[in-house]
């Protein structure tokens, strides 16, 4: 096992990775920006180094500086967390060239799966069902119209690179494509440096269900059941749970087996997630692969009893998986909600100073935090400040615990999305499992305002 690992990230995921490293006796190196001098991950690290100004381009995306700190601190490996450089093939390659272990898949796999067009091609070759669409970049809006006319509306206009709903839009006519194409292409170029656009058939009223996999360097790959992540706003997940209340055991097994097949077909190693859209008839279609640890990984940990970060570290250190698919059991039901520093009505960020923070406690309650009392939430980073995870013997008990925890969760000084999460948890449709990607728009639109119209 490694003796020292640099965590190239910030916030709750940096704390999460460091916690497991410490449990394994691994020394941790933290990096931080000028805006994060008092952040929890800085205080938790055994060593911490300032790497630049508050903006991510000046600090957390500065590959040269991060590698310099790794060399100075004599770290053996780098854990990228999620977001930032976690799916940056160049960063993974530079780590290897510097003699460092990148805790994740190979640069080539990251690059291939980072392009939605290339990943679609790979899955088609592997025999994994994909959403009907094209596997080449569109030249312009007029070509997009021609493709959509042949395919039939509605369709999803999507950026090939990146994620988080950026460069993505449902279009229902040729006029809508012409209006949407240039703007989405510019956003994709600005955020990801890649303006390639393509089209998929829009699956009406789907569920967003993903499968967690682990793969070692010896050809062993397992799936760790699924997570349902259908409750979203602006194409971004807000509530995640495991297992899905929608799937039957046959479909669950088929999705798991397809995910293992997909991972093996590309020579995947480490932790990864295969994301699917699932229609009302339980037909599932490959959406994309995330070549990193997911934000929502704790719900998988809660139902399997596994520490996914520990498994990542062991695989990266050259160990083989010490369990088989038959050993992967599941117990109970877990739900995670993301706590954002944002106005619950408009979804706009709400930076400021937290003046009071009271966290709910009790059986089956887990917290992952990026802040503490008196933390300054800056406008420079993603507004997620915490994750609340609950577990029950079954889904009803998990929802009861979620409602109770949210009722006792108090954050003062900034606005948060807790009121919205309370509405979701209390809604009869959520209790009944009617959690398609249209949940927020369908059930909360009137109360949450016109911003809901932008939610898929």
Image (cartoon, helix red, strand yellow):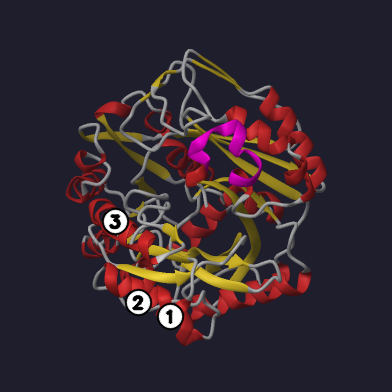
Q: Residues within 10 Å of mark 3 (few under 14, many from 20)?
A: many
| Residue depth check, mark 3 versus mark 1: number of the one nearer the observer | 1
* Residue positioned 72% across, 68% down in the render: 327
Q: Mark 1 highlights which residue? A: 150
What secondary structure is found at the residue carrying circle 3? helix
Image label count: 3
The disc label shown at residue 146, or none: 2
Magenta region includes residue 86: no
3D distance between C-alphas at marks 1 and 2: 6 Å
Q: Which of these two is toward me, 344 or 412?
A: 344
Q: Which of these two is toward me, 49 or 438?
A: 438
Q: Mark 3 highlights which residue? A: 188
Which SS does the magenta portion mostly show? helix
What secondary structure is found at the residue carrying circle 2? helix
- In the picture shown, does residue 400 fall above or below 290? above
Q: Can the viewer see residue 109?
A: no
Residue 451 spot, x, y in % from top left: 48, 38
- In the picture shown, does residue 67 fall above or below 89? above
What secondary structure is found at the residue carrying circle 1? helix
3D distance between C-alphas at marks 3 and 1: 25 Å
Residues tagged 3 and 1 counted as in contact (Cβ below 8 A): no
Q: Which of these two is toward me, 249 or 364?
A: 249
Residue 134 spot, x, y in % from top left: 39, 78
């Amino acid at each position: 096992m490694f003796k020292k690992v640099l965590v190239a990230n910030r916030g709750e995921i940096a704390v999460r990775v460091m916690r497991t490293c410490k449990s394994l006796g691994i020394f941790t190196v933290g990096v931080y920006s000028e805006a994060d001098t008092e952040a929890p991950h800085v205080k938790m690290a055994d060593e911490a180094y300032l790497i630049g100004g508050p903006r991510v381009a000046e600090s957390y995306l500065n590959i040269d500086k991060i590698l310099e700190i790794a060399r100075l601190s004599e770290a053996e490996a780098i854990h990228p967390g999620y977001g930032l450089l976690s799916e940056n093939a160049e960063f993974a390659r530079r780590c290897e060239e510097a003699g460092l272990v990148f805790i994740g898949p190979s640069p080539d796999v990251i690059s291939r799966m980072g392009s939605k067009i290339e990943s679609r091609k790979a899955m088609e070759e592997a025999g994994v069902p994909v959403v009907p669409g094209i596997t080449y970049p569109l030249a312009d809006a007029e070509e997009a119209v021609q493709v959509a006319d042949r395919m039939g509306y509605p369709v999803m206009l999507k950026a090939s690179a990146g994620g988080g709903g950026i460069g993505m839009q449902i279009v229902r006519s040729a006029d809508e494509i012409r209006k949407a194409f240039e703007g989405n292409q510019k956003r994709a170029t600005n955020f990801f440096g890649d303006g390639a656009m393509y089209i998929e058939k829009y699956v009406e009223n789907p569920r967003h269900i993903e499968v967690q996999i682990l793969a070692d360097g010896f050809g062993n790959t397992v799936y760790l059941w699924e997570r349902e992540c259908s409750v979203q706003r602006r194409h971004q997940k807000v509530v995640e749970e495991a297992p899905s209340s929608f799937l039957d055991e046959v479909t669950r097994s088929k999705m798991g087996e397809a995910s293992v097949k997909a991972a093996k077909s590309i020579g995947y190693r480490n932790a990864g997630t295969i994301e699917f859209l699932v229609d009302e008839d339980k037909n599932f279609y490959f959406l994309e692969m995330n070549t990193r640890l997911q934000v929502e990984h704790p719900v998988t940990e809660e139902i399997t009893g596994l520490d996914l970060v520990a498994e990542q570290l062991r695989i990266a250190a050259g160990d083989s998986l010490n369990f088989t698919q038959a050993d992967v059991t599941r117990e109970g039901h877990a739900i995670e909600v993301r706590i954002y520093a944002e106005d619950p009505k408009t979804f706009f960020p709400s930076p400021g100073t937290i003046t009071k923070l009271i966290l709910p406690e009790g059986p089956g309650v887990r917290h992952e935090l990026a802040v503490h009392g008196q933390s300054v939430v800056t406008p420079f980073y993603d507004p997620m400040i915490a994750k609340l995870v609950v577990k029950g013997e079954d889904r009803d008990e998990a929802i009861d615990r979620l409602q109770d925890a949210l009722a006792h969760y108090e954050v003062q000084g900034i606005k948060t999305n807790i009121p919205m999460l309370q509405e979701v948890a209390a809604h009869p449709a959520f209790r009944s499992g009617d959690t398609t990607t249209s949940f927020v728009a369908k059930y909360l639109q009137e109360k949450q305002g016109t911003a809901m119209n932008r939610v898929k």
